[in-house]
Image: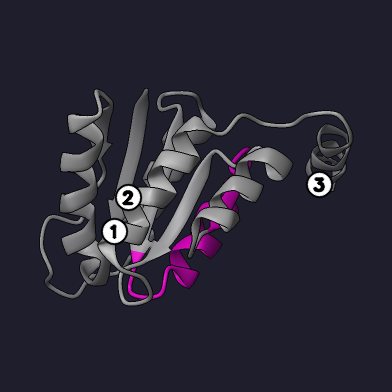
Amino acid sequence: MLIAIASDHAGFDYKTKIIAWLQSHDHKVRDFGTSSDVPCDYPLFIRPAAEAVANGDCERGIVLGGSGNGENIVANRVKGVRCAYCFNTETARLGREHNNANCISIGQRMISIDTVYAILKVFIETPFAGERHARRIALIDAV
């Protein structure tokens, strides 16, 4: 799977660890930045990653920050992106099953890296449940 990834300075450490984890699990990664922990403006990195998911250049996306909230907001402003804010495996599972999330947002200051790895596994492996959830996604997209 080709996965877009982006962070601000506050998510940079986890971003580098996630890239290594994804590659060790035979996934390809397209890194949209940032490239250090020097303070930066996260929309400059998050939006292009989300756009790559929305236009089909990447199959899924992962965005990171200190809390993950701003990054989630930016990603969800891109038409065609359904970004789930994840802080445990249950939020990742429900984001995939119920919302067909194609992107997740994670806060580096909020959870451990081991929790992140568990979230990634669920995000990658969980299928969309369809049925009533597909109808609800259509209603969201119609707005």
How packed is label 1: few (under 14 Cα within 10 Å), some, or many (20 or more)?
A: few
Left or right of 34 on screen, residue 117: right
Q: CA distance from mark 2 to mark 1?
A: 5 Å
Which residue is the site of mark 3?
Answer: 140
Q: Position of residue 96 (x, y in %)?
A: 61, 41
Q: Which one is nearer the viewer's eye here, 41 or 75?
A: 75
First along the sequence among labels 3 and 1: 1
The amino acid sitting under disc 2 is: Tyr
* Front position in the image: 84 or 9: 84
Residue 61 point in image, percent of width and height: 42, 41
Magenta-colored span = 65-85
Three-letter code, disc 3 = Ile
- Give how far apart the Cα atoms at labels 2 and 3 are: 29 Å
Residue 66 percent across, percent down from the top left: 33, 74
- Nearer the observer: mark 3 or 1; the answer is 1
Q: Which residue is mark 2?
A: 117
> Where does label 1 land, which residue?
114
Q: Is residue 72 magenta?
A: yes
Image position of 20 with respect to 91: above or below: above
Q: Secondary structure at mark 2?
A: helix
**Which residue is at 24% across, 72% downward?**
10
Instruction: Write down the quadrant of residue 57 in the picture.
Output: top left
**On the rendered structure, is 21 left or right of 48?**
left
Residue 22 rendering spot, x and y as whole percentages:
25, 36
* Rendered view: 96 above or below 77: above
The amino acid beneath tag 1 is: Asp
In primary-sequence order, the first of circles 2 and 3 is 2
The answer to whether the residue labelled 2 contacts the one labelled 3, judged by CB atoms less than 8 Å apart, is no
- Tell me if residue 84 comes above or below residue 25 in the rendering: below
